[in-house]
Amino acid sequence: MLWETIKLAVQAIFRNALRSFLTVLGIVIGVAAVIAMVIVGQGSAQQVTSDVEKLGSNVLMVMPGQDAFEGGPGTTDPPFSLADNNAVERELSFVDIAAPIAASRARVVFGNENRRTDIVGTDNRYFAAADWEIERGRVFEPSEIQSGRPVCVLGETVRDSLFGNANPIGETVRIKALSCTVIGHVKSKGASTFGSDQDDFVLMPLKTFQRRIAGNPDVTMMYLSISDRIEAARAQEGLERFLRDLRRIGPREDDDFTVMDMKQIATMLTGITDVLTGLLSAVAAVSLIVGGIGIMNIMLVSVTERTREIGIRLAIGAQARQVMTQFLIEAIVLSLIGGLIGVVLGLALAVLGSNALNVPFTPDIGIVLLAFAFSAAVGVVFGFFPARRAARMDPIEALRRE
Amino acid sequence: MADRSATPGPLIALRGISRIYGAGETEVRALDDVDLSIDDGEFVAIMGPSGSGKSTAMNVIGCLDAPTRGDYLFDGVNVARLSRDQRALLRRHYLGFIFQGYNLLPRTSALHNVELPLIYKGLGRAARRDAALRALAKVGLAERSHHDPSELSGGQQQRVAIARALAGNPRVVLADEPTGNLDSHMSVEIMEVLRDLNHREGLTIVMVTHEEDMAAYADRLIWMVDGRIERDAPTKRAA
Ligand SMILES: Nc1ncnc2c1ncn2[C@@H]1O[C@H](COP(=O)(O)OP(=O)(O)OP(=O)(O)O)[C@@H](O)[C@H]1O
Ligand SMILES: [Mg+2]
């Protein structure tokens, strides 16, 4: 009986193939959207996590200000100094390297070429802490660091946009009023997960930056490489305690600095992905509901068109519940067909999207089943009213209808 | 047919049946205090002017409709007290219908049309096919079983409808103007099929018709006027 009903439903659907297809379009789009977005979202979350693992989870960044996003030039909290940075490296046994960083954005010019980029003042410790390898040329000489010589090391993006195929070593670039000799450039790390270019910077000695670019002796960030013999949480705790002492923060006062580790950044980024995925999924859910209304509409038309058939079935002994089941199953089969097309389309879109965003394609059977179940549920919910209308028909009236 | 007439007494017994549409000023008494008994194996024709309540009577007898007043005993069971779903079960197991407009499912083969009531009876695929083919053979349409209604003549379509009514092995077949849409040649064809079923298989048939010629195939003629039975007598053939 059930099998018969399903067969009947499929027949009825294919008898009006075009109309059925247009009807399920809403479901198709909804399901495809959910699947594509969730899969691509999960892929990029996975990408972030693995990127961060590559960076090494034993990196801590310390900035003045209570919030990482408030830090930098705007904050009213006192900046760090080179001495602070060196004290951290010297006093804390679990800090292998502390690299002082002061940075701002400025235009770097060579001949006719120019580029707005991050100008970073630091010293050789930064190469070691952040794993920058020299591609050509050299790092800073101690004397250059000592006396703040106008020399710089380029990130790959800056090198490429200013020099193309030419050898930059020994050339002079201009940053604001400063003429600066290129002494080296570093190997590319490529784009980060969210497409931000990690190679877009110019490095120079900290003192050069402080005197010639910033005009102050501030260190705006300490970039710390932490020993892997200590747990991240304990390292962070020890660091915070040390900095509170150093900056003379009273026991009841809040920190006036922020310590971030890469894991936190990763969680933050995946959090953003989750929010985005959630938002887009909500849009997709709305389209499923619109799809459901389409199904309800077409089922109502179908019930009206087939009034006579319903009359015949009732006359030969179908009970109300059996007529109800028939139309309900028809609605469910209809939306499942939509769901199936949507799953296929969604997976295809997910493959394309993952490729385009350069994140791994992580098909998830759970979300596929969920989308499928959801489309069946749409069938039940929106098929119910038309099916009940069919079931409540009076056989005599129904048979009389032309 | 050993299981037929399980209970003594008439198969169909209407006792003071009224069917009233509307209320107050606009009230229509489609059936007005009707008493009627039909025995197992009878072939009854109902005639009467338009609006006299013939179809209403058929609907009540066929358990499609419930009377406003009175008792209707079908094989001893009081149908007037049954629920909608219980009446559906009675129709499924004991009643077959033939309509003026055939009422076959379009774009569905003769065979599938005939199988339809058997699906609701819960027969398996093979049994259903068997019974449907046998019913089609009885009306002389075995070789047309795979044709759609649109490929069949009016007479043939009505024969498919008869096969559908027969397929479930009912105790009564109700036919409301079965020849109403057919020319005289096809009408005779249909009436001969019905008469044969009544004679050979003892099938009880109640038929509404507007034509004397068709009524003549029955054993008994009921004449209705204004929702009442005015005359109830054997036909010439039976006499
Ligand atoms: N659903 C209904 N609502 C109101 N009145 C109805 C309804 N069905 C039938 N009637 C009325 O009941 C009366 C009997 O109708 P019925 O259909 O039984 O007549 P009939 O004898 O079959 O007529 P015909 O020969 O034209 O088919 C008529 O007056 C009709 O208008
Ligand atoms: Mg009538």
Image (spheres, rainbow, N blue to C red):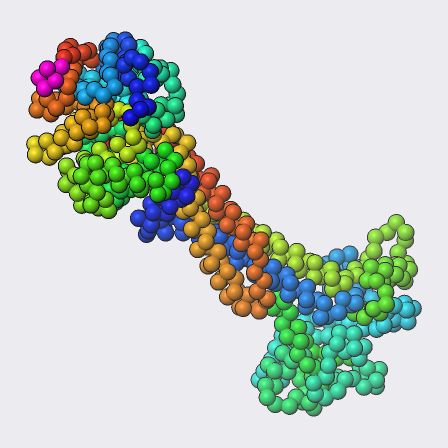
Q: Residue at x 32, y 52 (%)?
A: A18
Tell me which segment is drawn in magenta: B234-239
Question: Where residue A237 sits: x, y (%)?
Answer: 86, 59
Q: Residue at x 33, y 19 (%)?
A: B6
Q: Quadrant of the N terminus of chain A?
A: top left
Q: Residue at x 61, y 53 (%)?
A: A275
Front-lying residue, A19 or B86: B86
Q: Reply above or below: A234 against A104.
A: above
Q: Residue at x 73, y 78 (%)?
A: A132
Question: Where residue A375 sits: x, y (%)?
Answer: 48, 47
Is B9 magenta? The answer is: no
Name the quadrant containing residue A175: bottom right
Name the quadrant containing residue A201: bottom right
In-image side of A123 versus B117 (left or right): right
In-image side of A392 versus A283 (left or right): left
Q: Which residue lies most toward the front here?
A: B2
Front-lying residue, A33 or A190: A33
Front-lying residue, A381 or B65: B65
Front-lying residue, B236 or A333: B236
Question: Where residue A46 sits: x, y (%)?
Answer: 64, 63
Magenta-drawn stretch, dominant element (helix, strand or loop): loop
Residue A286 in sight: no
Q: Reply above or below: A160 against A271.
A: below
Residue A370 in sight: yes
In-image side of B158 versus A224 (left or right): left
Q: Quadrant of the C terminus of chain A?
A: top left
Question: Where residue A224 sits: x, y (%)?
Answer: 81, 69
